[in-house]
Amino acid sequence: MANPKRKHSKSRSRKRRTHQKVTKPLLVECKECHREKVAHMVCPFCGYYGGKEIIKGEIKEKKKKQ
């Protein structure tokens, strides 16, 4: 197996890693309950996807800090 002849500098290694970062998930508004949800997923609050009820259940209310 080949081995490098010289050590790569820190800046060279970091330049290579600039694209390895975490991105935020795409959030869209649910058409039923108008809350933010992950795109292309069933709404965790109302259970609707594409205008159809997929998961039966009531709308969960957000807990307020007291």
Image: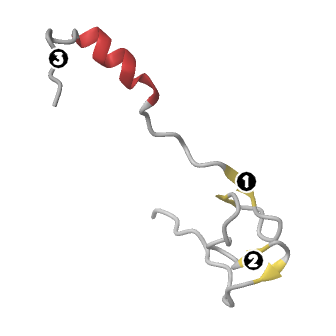
Q: Position of residue 5 (x, y in %)?
A: 14, 11
Give left or right: position of 30 versus 41. right
Residue 40 found in image quarter: bottom right
Residue nearest the observer in this picture, 66 or 50? 50
Residue at numbered disc 2: 48
**How far separated are the C-alphas under marks 1 and 3?**
47 Å
Kind of residue at disc 2: Tyr
Q: Are marks 2 and 3 in contact (CB under 8 Å)?
A: no
Residue at numbered disc 3: 4
Q: Which mark is residue 52?
A: none
In the picture, the quarter occupied by the N terminus is top left
In the picture, the quarter occupied by the C terminus is bottom left
Give left or right: position of 55 versus 12. right
Q: Position of residue 43 (x, y in %)?
A: 67, 71
In the image, farthest residue toward the front:
1
Kindly identify the residue that appears in the image at 14 percent across and 9 percent down: 6
